[in-house]
Image (cartoon, rainbow, N blue to C red):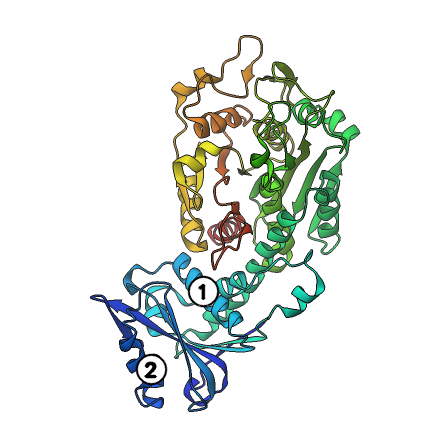
Amino acid sequence: MKFQSSVSDYRTSSGDMLVVFAANDKEQYVLSGEGKAVDELLSGVLSELLSGERYDGAFDSTYLIHTHGKIGYKAVLVTGLGDVKKLTVGKVQKVCARIARRATSARAFSLHVALTSDLTSVIPAELLGQSVSEGILLGSYVFLKHKEEKVRIKHHDISECIIHIAGGKLDAFDKGLKRGEIVAGAVSFVRDLVNEPPSTTTPAYLGDRAKSLAKKDPSLSATVFDKKGITTLGMGALLGIARGSEEDPRFIHLSYKATGAKKTVVIVGKGITFDTGGLSLKPANGMETMKLDMAGAGAVLGVFSVLPLLKPHVNVVGLISATENMPSGSAIKPGDIVTAMNGKTIEVLNTDAEGRVVLADALSYACKNTKPDYIIDLATLTGACMVALGEEVSGMFTNDTQLGQNLKSAADNSGEAIWELPLVEEYEEELKSNVADIKNVGSTRYGGAINGALFLKEFVDDGISWAHLDIAGPSFSEKDTPLVPKGASGVGVRLLLEFLKSESVSHE
């Protein structure tokens, strides 16, 4: 899809579909100035139809009319913004994703959007431009690779999207529009990666994708450790979880070097390419979507796929512990003890709490080998976090208040939702083992998300700023929504790229 911003008069342009906006005020619709102008061109037909259908301009609502040649557009789509004062980046993305869905179903090739000044008054121009292109592109995403040819051929793609913006800060809007295209591309990259079957997305496959990314730009490099290399590193935790699988594990170290940058941000992804639960076996219906358990690793790769394009002025390291978690005669057993890279011993009482175990080695490696200013890990870690926060919000834990505030700000500006949960020191007693330094699950079923984060904290050296993002809820959607179709969401990419952008600005 080709994006273009324009200050030309949308009323004299032509295309397949024109989008105008309406707000909701006292349970009634209020057309934007652009909508009123189109209504005049249509001799009041638009407002007559809206009133007749009792359309109210509620958020994310739409109403489509065909113009029958009365203006230069075949159809006009009225899109509701609800209470304009309550609009956020995330809401704008959702509205734009809805527009993309309606335009696709109407088989529009040329989509024009008459941007209302209500939006430009609420959200800064650059951020608005980014939100618009991200929303439209993510709303257009489909994964049809494994569908038969006639299904792929039948699918409709929008060819061009022209955004008509009335005056002021066009350069900033264009800059955001372009960034949104890049960020949406990274999210789609991750969605594709996670949506692939686990027979494709193996640990070795993730390693190969990392090496392929590194070859595309001199600012990137990648080192992929095989089983022998992992053994040499002393990563007994990762090796322990990998024992049950015929697929050998990989440990991936990606690096992005920004010229003159002094700060280093390390992002760590959980890469369980398929999770059966191991000998603590999941029920059959609990395994159906467990290809998603490498969504954290996917987010790391997605970020690195666009760093050379976005060029943040901060060094970035990406680390991925990748393995399957499978039952077999050689699989790790409940009660087994493994030794992490930092020398701590872990009693593995539940093999289905394996993600934190493989992350223990990745975090230890980060502290020892990368000289990090910040470490941020992403993991589909606990169902408990989903119980607490639902399917659209990631849980955040951190030992650094300022880092937490920066991540919250990045979340607001990226459209992703995070909520801070506490690292309750008293709960550390739950993780004490009688036979090892720590056990991988708590003594009770309560506070599971907190216990998972407290476990990870044990592998972060004192004095290092660290945050853990539990993305179990939003990583994979079981329902089809405009912004996130059923399947992988690509969560974490938008947040991390916005965070890296803010770190670049604060240290220029």
Query: Secondary structure under badge 2?
Result: helix
Q: Amino acid at mark 2?
A: Leu
Q: Is residue 265 above or below residue 486?
A: above
- Against 163, residue 462 (above or below) is above
> Which tag, 2 or 1, sits closer to the chain's start?
2
The residue furthest left is 26
Q: Camera-side residue: 226 or 312?
A: 226
Position of the N terminus, as image quadrant, is bottom right
- In the image, taking residue 299 as reference, residue 129 lies left or right, namely left
Q: Which mark is residue 98?
A: 1
The image quadrant that residue 336 belongs to is top right
Q: Which residue is mark 2?
A: 46
Q: Position of residue 122 (x, y in %)?
A: 33, 65
Number of residue marks: 2
Q: Position of residue 175 (x, y in %)?
A: 51, 68
In three-dimensional space, the C-alpha distance between marks 2 and 1, rounded to whole angstroms, equals: 20 Å
The picture quadrant where one finds residue 312 is: bottom right
Residue drawn at x 41%, y 87% is 11
Residue at x 72%, y 54% (from the top left corner): 218
**Is residue 462 among the parts visible in the rendering?**
no
